[in-house]
Image: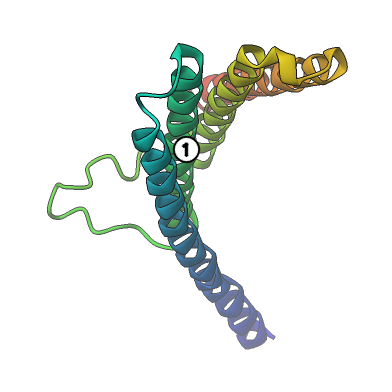
Amino acid sequence: MKSLELIVERIILSSRWLLVVFYLGLVAALALYGVSFIYKLYKVAIKVFSYDEADMILAMLGLIDAALVASLIVMVMISGYENFVSRFDESDGEVSFLGKLDSGSLKIKVASSIVAISSIHLLQIFLNTQHYSNQQLMWATIMHIAFVVSALMLGFLEQIMNRLKK
């Protein structure tokens, strides 16, 4: 019976390597998103002299939004791999930031990134209010507030957990 238990435990522990497929998929998604970003940047560049100030601000917010989403993907890939699959080799010192994101701090960073992305979307909506109904504005604001409250609650819970660990 002990040998069967050992085999099951090894299979379960080895299954974490299946997550690599998801992380490699995120690498591919990041590359595709990079191509999309370059296209957006190209569209901004060719219209730079025809955009008025509001259009230029909206275009820049779109580029900032893309950078935040890309950073979020990288953060999830690196910390997910580190937390659930295997540690990175830190011998070269180039990756000194690795290993500093546990699952609790990752949740807070992801929530913070989502709030930042939501803030940019909400700002884009408010700069284009003529294209949105009052109901759409209300729901966008409510969703943003929900993201903010969720991030605050995650931070609060993480703080409680850290106190309990000490």
Residue 127 or residue 51, whichever sits in front: 51
Q: Please, which residue is most extreme toward the right here?
A: 135
Amino acid at the residue labelled 1: Ala
Residue 78 in the image, given as x and y percentages of width and height = 40, 51
Q: Which residue appears at 59% of the width and 20% of the height?
A: 124
Question: In what quadrant of the picture does the N terminus appear?
Answer: bottom right
Q: Secondary structure at mark 1?
A: helix
- Mark yes or no: residue 60 visible: yes
Q: Which residue appears at 55% of the width and 72% of the height?
A: 18
Indicate whether 88 appears above or below 131.
Answer: below
Which quadrant of the figure has residue 155? top right
Residue 88 in the image, given as x and y percentages of width and height = 30, 57
Q: Please, which residue is most extreme toward the left here?
A: 92
Residue on which the image places disc 1: 66
Dot 1 alpha-carbon crowd within 10 angstroms: few under 14, some 14 to 19, many 20 or more: some
Indicate whether 104 appears above or below 8.
Answer: above
In the figure, is residue 4 to the left or right of 29?
right
Residue 34 or residue 13, whichever sits in front: 34
Indicate whether 46 appears above or below 32.
Answer: above
Residue 108 or residue 143, whichever sits in front: 143
In the figure, is residue 82 to the left or right of 134?
left
Residue 43 in the image, given as x and y percentages of width and height = 42, 40
Q: Which residue appears at 34% of the width and 58% of the height?
A: 87
- Mark yes or no: residue 78 visible: no
Which quadrant of the figure has residue 56? top left
In the figure, is residue 4 to the left or right of 99?
right
